[in-house]
Amino acid sequence: MRLATDWREYAEQMLSVCNATPALETLSPDETYVTRPDFRPPTRFERRGARLGHGVWDLAYRKRN
């Protein structure tokens, strides 16, 4: 599962909820954010945010067996 947002508070909430979900395992080595994967093109909102100096936070998880 991949998630991305340009709202820092939303990213922190997603990180908190997903990391606390036993069925999910983070793909981040430090249990925080991951680099935007090359296969995910930047969205219109992301491009606009970059022009305005906003950050974008990507999260990645997989289902635990």
Image (cartoon, rainbow, N blue to C red):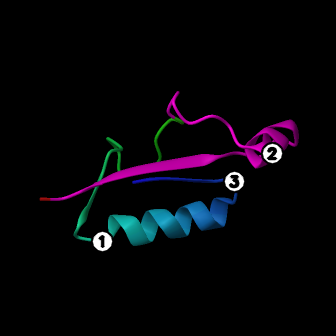
Which tag, 3 or 1, sits closer to the chain's start?
3
Q: CA distance from mark 1 to mark 2?
A: 29 Å
Q: Which residue is mark 2?
A: 49
Disc 3 vs disc 1: Cβ atoms closer than 8 Å?
A: no
Compared with 14, 60 (above or below) is above
Residue 8 can be seen, yes or no: yes
Q: Position of residue 31 (x, y in %)?
A: 35, 51
Which tag, 1 or 2, sits closer to the chain's start?
1
Q: CA distance from mark 3 to mark 2?
A: 7 Å
Q: Which mark is residue 21?
A: 1
Residue pictured at 36% horizontal, 44% vertical: 28
Is 43 on the left-hand or right-hand side of 15?
A: right
* Rendered image quadrant of residue 52: top right
**Residue 51 in magenta stretch:** yes
Compared with 19, 40 (above or below) is above
Residue pictured at 42% horizontal, 72% vertical: 17
Q: Which residue is mark 3?
A: 6
Q: Amino acid at mark 1?
A: Thr
Is 64 on the left-hand or right-hand side of 26?
A: left
Furthest residue in direction left, as rendered: 65
Residue stretch in magenta: 37-64
Residue pictured at 65% horizontal, 46% vertical: 56
In terms of depth relative to the viewer, which is nearer, 30 or 38? 38
In terms of depth relative to the viewer, which is nearer, 45 or 34? 45
Q: Position of residue 10 (x, y in %)?
A: 61, 66
SS class of the residue under badge 2? helix
Residue pictured at 46% horizontal, 62% vertical: 15
